[in-house]
Image: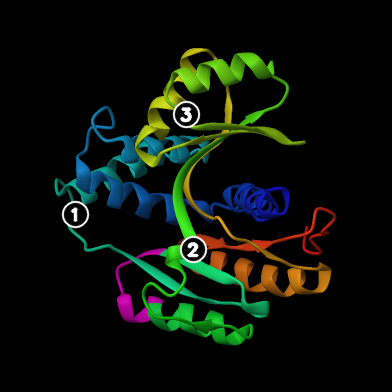
Amino acid sequence: MAGHSKWANIKHRKARQDASRGKIWTKVIREITVAAKGGPDPDDNPRLRLALDKANASNMPKDTIKRAIQKGSGTGEMGIIEELVFEGYGPNGVAILVETMTDNRNRTVADVRHAFSKFGGNMGTDGSVAYLFNKLGVIHIANSYEEDFIMEVALEAGAEDFVVTEDYFEIITTPINLSDVAAALQEKDIETLNAETTMRAETLVHLDQEASEKVLKIMNFMDDLDDVQEVHTNAEFPDDFVDEEA
């Protein structure tokens, strides 16, 4: 788990850097727009509620959020944004799952295919690696809180697992229960570092430092593509892996 979480830590650091440059807004706007298709009221739409949390965390203007909700719910400017998932293999045969949101399918397919080939990987067919991953809800809490208290609140709210790491407490939920658990923590004035749905592999591919560097390059490149929302892998980076781009 520790090695696999290394990519999650790198992504979160990278997201903070992107947020400071405003790059994250584009991804969050798309996420709100797609989520709002399920209804414009966040109280009745857990996915939209999580997207709005991301928007507020990145200091997105309220007018921008409103327009994205209106566009997605059909009450504002219309536009077609579709969700596409791409599967393939990267260096050392690691599985890579790429979640995208796009208004131009051909552009996105070309960009993702180019990313795979540029770094010695190859894009696979539907189902080629998706079976390796499970969809989960994940919440991270600073480990400065009292462990038993956090565990009790989380499990009572419907969490499925509680993991203690060196850097944070990790709460695992089903995707449908994620917003409820996050809300329960908020009610107890427990601040979350992040709350998101993710795809996590059960079987991991262990990498050394050199292989980790190669995989990280394709993961970072994918993550920087305009239409890419999330990138997942079954690569397990070593505990002592040093991110040269940090």
Whole-number angstrom distance, CA of label 2 to CA of label 1: 38 Å
Residue 210 percent across, percent down from the top left: 81, 73
Would you say the residues marked 2 and 1 are in contact, meaning their CB atoms lie under 8 Å apart?
A: no
Residue in the foreground of this view, choosing between 37 and 97: 97
Residue 93 percent across, percent down from the top left: 62, 78
105 versus 202 height, above or below: below
Which picture quadrant has residue 64? Answer: top left
117 versus 246 height, above or below: below
Report which residue position mark 3 lands on: 159
Label located before the other in sequence (2 or 3) = 2
For residue 130, the mark is: none
Q: Secondary structure at mark 2?
A: helix
Label located before the other in sequence (2 or 1) = 1
Report which residue position mark 2 lands on: 132
Q: Which residues are magenta?
A: 100-108
Report which residue position mark 1 lands on: 77
Would you say the residues marked 3 and 1 are in contact, meaning their CB atoms lie under 8 Å apart?
A: no
Whole-number angstrom distance, CA of label 2 to CA of label 3: 22 Å
Query: Residue at the spot x=29%, y=50% of the render?
Result: 33
180 versus 20 height, above or below: above
Looking at the rendered image, the quarter that the C terminus falls into is: bottom right
Question: Could you tell me the amino acid type at mark 1?
Answer: Glu
Question: Could you tell me the amino acid type at mark 2?
Answer: Leu
Residue 111 percent across, percent down from the top left: 46, 79
